[in-house]
């Protein structure tokens, strides 16, 4: 909630002590942020920030590590204007970037644009021209086929839809008393699945039903894209990331898409004469960080763009900060990307060590994302209004208006 909105609520509550207390509580809650400002309002930001989500910003759907306060500091006080360019750089996904941005905005209390959300499957957009009109299969939790359709793929089926077109393709289906969601079955889909060859399979997000998905993918990949037929050339296979583990709500890490890839690869190579061919995107791939840099450039407020346009291949930013919890993904990726990336490792997710990670040491280790943002602001010379000072000012405003 913006300061101006709270001020109006507080000033209109003079007739009710309870409402005054409520307004005061809201104001003091908002005031707990340490608001900050650039030394010069017209100064172009010389740095940008990329945040991992799971284990840094959220655990499940719960904000952690002071993430709402940390993100609030990236805006100009209470007006909601972006001050520091930032993006979310996550290997997660399963829903369109627009939906993820909306969800994050609600959870974190700031306005996040779809362009600020770079998910593991976001690079799949680059393959639209190649497979735009071909039959493709989208695997994973959430809305994998919707994701691919929004990217521009015109003939995308979820693996749920595709598997439902082949009777008995999953021999264990009768023992599964659950469903992954509504399956859109019609004659057109069944006809397409049974007559057209799958040209590519995309693992958009974590598989929900490993046994069925591995079985169906092996059928597709062994037969040139038409289950039940003779062995033929393998269709293309793409993974949104290769994370072996990730931090979810459970205290210890959960197996991720990298584990699913290992299982699929092992089984496929055991029943097929040739090794599995695939391409993995996501962190720590350096191309992901280069793409994030481009997005961050586009995120710089337009008032800075024209006056500070940089040509000749020079970096717009002096420093780009990657804040993550997974040394082998976030930190390794930032290190491989090189200048101008600076890696910050938090202890709120996969990494919980007291010292720096031995194999993939970060440039800085902190406890929380809020501590990371504090460090960045100090390093970049951004002045912080002390929290106690802001609280005193807030109390004065409430007292005068009640």
Image: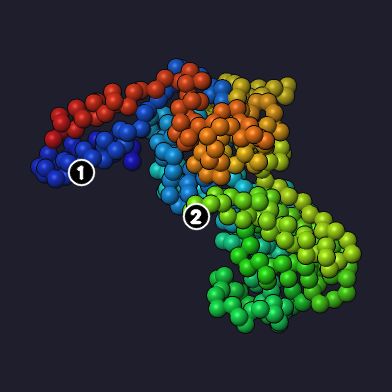
Image spot of residue 371 (x, y percent) = 46, 31
The way the protein has been coloured in the rendering is rainbow
Rendered location of residue 338, percent (x, y): 69, 28
Above/below status of 47 relative to 20: above
The answer to whether 260 appears left or right of 251 in the picture is right
Quadrant for the N terminus, please: top left
| Residue, disc 2 | 250
Residue 156 image position (x, y, % from top left): 69, 64
* Numbered tag placed on residue 295 in the rendering: none
Query: Which quarter of the rendered picture does the C terminus lie within?
Result: top left
- The residue under label 1 is 22
Give the residue displayed 43% in from the left and 49% down from the top.
62
Determine contact: label 1, label 2, CB under 8 Å: no
| 333 relative to 197, above or below | above
Whether residue 156 appears in this view of the structure is no
Q: CA distance from mark 1 to mark 2?
A: 35 Å
| Callout in the foreground (1, 2) | 2
Q: Residue at x 19, y 27 (%)?
A: 396
Q: Secondary structure at mark 2?
A: loop
Q: Say whether residue 129 is left or right of residue 109.
A: right
Q: Is 28 located above or below residue 148 in the figure?
A: above
Q: Which residue occupies 77% across, 77% down?
A: 194
Circle 1: element type: helix
Mark 1, other Cα within 10 Å: few <14 / some 14–19 / many ≥20: some
Q: Nearer the viewer, residue 110 or 255?
A: 255
**Residue 283 visible from this viewpoint:** yes
In primary-sequence order, the first of circles 1 and 2 is 1
Q: Residues within 10 Å of mark 2 (few under 14, many from 20)?
A: few
Residue 350 placed where, x, y %? 56, 45
Residue at horizontal 29 percent and vertical 38 percent from the top:
29
């Amino acid at each position: 909630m913006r300061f101006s909105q709270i001020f109006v609520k507080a000033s209109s509550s003079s007739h009710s002590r309870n409402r005054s207390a409520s307004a005061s509580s809201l104001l003091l809650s908002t005031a707990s942020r340490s608001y900050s400002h650039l030394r010069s309002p017209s100064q172009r930001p010389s740095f940008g920030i990329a945040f991992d989500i799971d284990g840094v910003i959220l655990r499940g759907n719960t904000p952690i590590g002071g993430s709402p306060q940390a993100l609030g500091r990236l805006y100009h006080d209470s007006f909601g204007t972006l001050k520091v360019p930032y993006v979310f750089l996550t290997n997660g996904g399963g829903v369109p970037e627009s939906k993820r941005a909306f969800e994050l905005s609600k959870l974190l209390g700031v306005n996040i644009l779809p362009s600020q959300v770079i998910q593991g499957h976001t690079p799949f957009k680059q393959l639209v021209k190649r497979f735009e009109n071909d039959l493709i299969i989208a695997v994973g939790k959430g809305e994998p086929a919707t994701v691919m359709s929004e990217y521009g793929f015109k003939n995308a089926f979820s693996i749920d839809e595709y598997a439902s077109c082949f009777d008995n393709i999953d021999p264990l289906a009768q023992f599964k008393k659950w469903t992954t969601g509504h399956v859109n079955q019609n004659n057109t889909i069944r006809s397409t699945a049974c007559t057209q060859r799958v040209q590519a399979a995309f693992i958009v997000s974590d598989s929900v039903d490993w046994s069925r998905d591995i079985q169906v993918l092996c059928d597709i990949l062994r037969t040139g894209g038409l289950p039940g037929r003779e062995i033929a050339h393998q269709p293309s296979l793409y993974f949104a990331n290769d994370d072996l583990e990730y931090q979810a709500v459970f205290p210890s890490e959960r197996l991720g898409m990298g584990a699913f890839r290992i299982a699929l690869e092992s089984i496929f190579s055991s029943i097929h004469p040739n090794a599995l061919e695939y391409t993995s995107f996501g962190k720590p791939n350096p191309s992901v960080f280069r793409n994030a840099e481009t997005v961050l450039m586009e995120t710089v407020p337009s008032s800075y763009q024209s006056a500070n346009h940089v040509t000749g291949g020079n970096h717009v930013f002096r420093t780009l900060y990657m804040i993550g919890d997974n040394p082998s993904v976030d930190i390794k990726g930032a290190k491989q990307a090189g200048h101008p990336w600076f890696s910050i490792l938090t202890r709120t997710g996969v990494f919980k060590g007291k010292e720096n990670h031995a194999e993939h040491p970060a440039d800085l280790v902190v406890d929380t994302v809020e501590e990371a943002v504090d460090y960045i602001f100090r390093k970049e010379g951004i002045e912080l209004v002390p929290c106690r000072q802001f609280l005193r000012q807030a109390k004065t405003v409430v007292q005068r208006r009640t």
